[in-house]
Image (cartoon, rainbow, N blue to C red):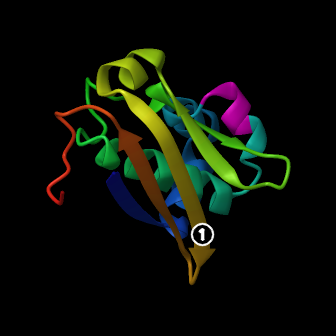
Amino acid sequence: MMTGIDIVKIERIEKLLEKHPDKVLKRFLHEEEIALAQSAETVAGFYAAKEAVSKALGHGISATCGFHDIKIHKDSRGAPYFTLKRELVEKLQITKCALSISHDGGFAIAVACIWSKSPSGREICH
């Protein structure tokens, strides 16, 4: 299992949204995600989630894994989950993933867990 975590100050996202609302959102969210993100808290949570997922993959946001390669969804109960670009799933042999997002004290935090069959995974505990 590979894990990633990220934390974002919600005020930082609020300031960005005030200056360039459409540009900021389209830079890292899909249209469906923008429709779900009705507050700065949610936008900050989605940003933290994408960073956490990319860290769990061992790449960070990069040419290997960009913001638009990760898609955040909500299930029927409002719980977040994510999907990845098919090429990443196949290359890393991903079998299962989990995501948690929380907001408190002016911060949004996300933790992502990814399970893989790949022998090149970053597991150091056997």
Number of numbered discs on residues:
1
Classified by dominant secondary structure, the portion drawn in magenta counts as helix
Image point (16%, 34%), residue name? 120
Say above or below: 108 vs 25: below
Q: Where is residue 34 in the image (x, y as percent from the top left)?
A: 69, 37
Say above or below: 11 vs 93: below
**Residue 62 versus residue 115: which sits nearer the camera?**
115
Query: Which region is colored magenta?
Result: 30-34
Lateral position of residue 61 relative to residue 124, left or right:
right
Q: Give SS at disc 1.
A: strand
**Residue 12 versus residue 80: which sits nearer the camera?**
80
**Residue 33 versus residue 5: which sits nearer the camera?**
5
Image point (31%, 40%), residue name? 57
Q: Does the magenta stretch include residue 46?
A: no
Say above or below: 31 vs 125: above
Tell which residue pokes out farthest to the bottom in this image: 105
Image point (18%, 57%), residue name? 126
Tag 1: residue type?
A: Ser
Indicate the quadrant where residue 66 lies: top left
Tell which residue pokes out farthest to the right in this image: 76
**Residue 69 versus residue 37: which sits nearer the camera?**
69
Say above or below: 47 vs 109: above
Residue 95 seen in the current view: yes
Q: Position of residue 32 (x, y in %)?
A: 72, 30
Q: Mark 1 points at which residue?
A: 102
Lateral position of residue 119 relative to residue 34, left or right:
left
Q: How crowded is mark 1: few (under 14 residues within 10 Å), some or many (20 or more)?
A: some
Q: Position of residue 49 (x, y in %)?
A: 49, 51
Image point (37%, 23%), residue name? 88
Q: Position of residue 87 (x, y in %)?
A: 39, 15
Indicate the quadrant where residue 121 lies: top left
Residue 44 seen in the current view: no
